Amino acid sequence: MDLMPLTDGADLVRTRSPIAYTEAEQQFSLFMQRKLHRLLRGAENNLILMRRYCQDRPEVAFFLPSRIEKQQIRCQVAEGIVQGVLRFLDPFAPGGPIAQQVRSDRLIEIQTFPTQYPHIVVERTDVFQRQSGQCLYIEWQAVRVQNQRKSTLVNRALDIANLGLELVRFIRP
């Protein structure tokens, strides 16, 4: 049973079945989610998602860390993960890619949703029984993706530097 009526934000609250990711696809989904969070926090200024080659035969390239077995990633799954990031970055998007990981006998899926506040997102976590695919629970969490304290400290340091310059100007005629 849904908690809220299904409207434009239906993906945030609807019940869903787990996605059939391979282990490498799980790693790729987590990699993309972490890269997206780094971009949102300002730890990285850009995030190359994929490249589509248009010459002789159409090909798509994904930028993966070397630890992920590229042969175990299906192109359509990787493209779906990347398209989830693109949809997330659209301000009218329903939600980002679904990142998946395995913890003992549970399969955990996390999806990030934008909010009206630029540095706050909502993360939906679906926890499934690994063998049966039965949903154990769904959790929603608001997450700040920018370190407010760090920004405040930088601004204070800049204010002190500006005061120092003003003081030097005042003392030196």
Image (tube, rainbow, N blue to C red):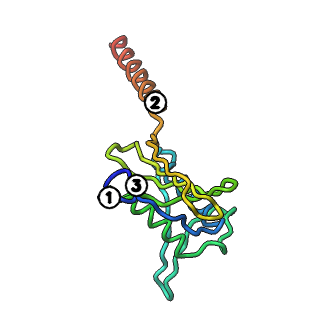
Residue 166 percent coordinates (x, y): 35, 18
Residue at image location 61% in from the left, 62% down from the top: 26
Q: Which residue is mark 2?
A: 154
Q: Which residue is mark 1?
A: 6
- Given the image, on which type of amino acid does mark 2 rest? Val
Residue at image location 66% in from the left, 73% down from the top: 72
- For the residues labelled 2 and 1, say whether their Cβ atoms are less than 8 Å apart: no
Side (left or right) of 15 relative to 27:
left
Which of the two labelled residues, at mark 2 and mark 3, occupies the earlier sequence position?
Answer: 3
- Given the image, on which type of amino acid does mark 1 rest? Leu
Q: Which mark is residue 145?
A: none
What is the distance, in whole Å, between disc 2 and disc 3 at their CAs?
38 Å
Towards the viewer: 92 or 124 = 124
Quadrant into which the N terminus falls: bottom left
- Given the image, on which type of amino acid does mark 3 rest? Val
Indicate which label's residue lies in the foreground, 2 or 3. Answer: 3
Residue at image location 48% in from the left, 50% down from the top: 39
Residue 76 percent coordinates (x, y): 52, 75
Q: Which residue is mark 3?
A: 13
- For the residues labelled 1 and 3, say whether their Cβ atoms are less than 8 Å apart: yes
User: Judging from the image, what secondary structure is the residue with disc 1 in?
Assistant: loop
Indicate which label's residue lies in the foreground, 2 or 1. Answer: 1
Side (left or right) of 68 relative to 145:
right
Task: Give the image quarter of residue 94.
Answer: bottom left
Task: Give the image quarter of residue 5.
Answer: bottom left
What is the distance, in whole Å, between disc 2 and disc 1 at their CAs?
42 Å
Towards the viewer: 37 or 142 = 142
- For the residues labelled 2 and 3, say whether their Cβ atoms are less than 8 Å apart: no
Q: Is residue 19 above or below residue 167?
A: below
